[in-house]
Amino acid sequence: MKAKKKKGGHARSGRTVRTSQVEMTQVVLPGDTNHHGTVFGGKVMQWIDICGGVAAHRHAQSDVVTASMDELHFLAPARLGDIVVLRSSVNAVGRSSMEVGVKIWSESPETGERRHTASAYVTFVSIDGKSRPREVPNLIPETPDERRRLAEGTKRLAERRLRRSR
């Protein structure tokens, strides 16, 4: 796929979705749980931020900072001893920002059964050595699902920009 021309005639490089994909696992330990024996929501948010940040860093090939996290709904609990599996990849890119989708499952170590625990969209901004926004490569989708996620993610990025400007 050809790189898009930016202002000044320079081509902006592109990277595929698969170059940013991350799978991360965590075991829910006693220090991660509340008095109900389920993982703290804040701990899950931390894991989401780390997993999403690695995907954004891989895509941008630079340092990134978290700009926002969309709604987060906990769909099923992760319990003490469960294995938590997080998967992330870049869905869409702006000039310096990236929307990363993160999906979380909890897995029973005894049965291997997985439950969808949560999903989130996190926006990261690529920064240079002086902590200023830095342009990121275009995103090159390769599958119909990646093209759908790119279209939907691009729309959400635009909606976030609009809300921020109000």
Image (tube, rainbow, N blue to C red):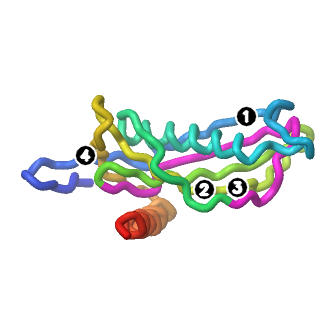
Q: Residue at coordinates 35% horizontally, 46% vertically from top-left?
A: 15
Return the x and y of residue 130 as percentages of the image width and height: 28, 31
Report the residue that reaches farthest toward the front.
Answer: 166
Please report whichever mark, 2 or 4, sits nearer to the chain's N-terminal start. Answer: 4
Q: Is residue 147 visible?
A: no
Q: Residues within 10 Å of mark 2 (few under 14, many from 20)?
A: many
CA–CA distance between discs 1 and 3? 15 Å
Disc 3 secondary structure class: strand
Please report whichever mark, 2 or 1, sits nearer to the chain's N-terminal start. Answer: 1
Q: Is residue 125 visible?
A: yes
Return the x and y of residue 9 as percentages of the image width and height: 8, 52
CA–CA distance between discs 2 and 4? 27 Å
Mark 4 = which residue?
13
CA–CA distance between discs 3 and 2? 7 Å
Total marks placed? 4
Mark 3 = which residue?
118
- Circle 2: residue type: Ala
Q: Residues within 10 Å of mark 3 (few under 14, many from 20)?
A: many
Return the x and y of residue 25 as percentages of the image width and height: 69, 36
- Circle 4: residue type: Ser
Q: Residue at coordinates 37% horizontally, 51% vertically from top-left?
A: 97
- Circle 1: residue type: Gln
Mark 2 = which residue?
120
Residue 105 in the image: above or below residue 110:
below
Please report contact status of discs 2 and 4: CB closer than 8 Å, yes or no.
no
Is 111 situated left or right of 130 in this image? right
Magenta stretch bounds: 73-94
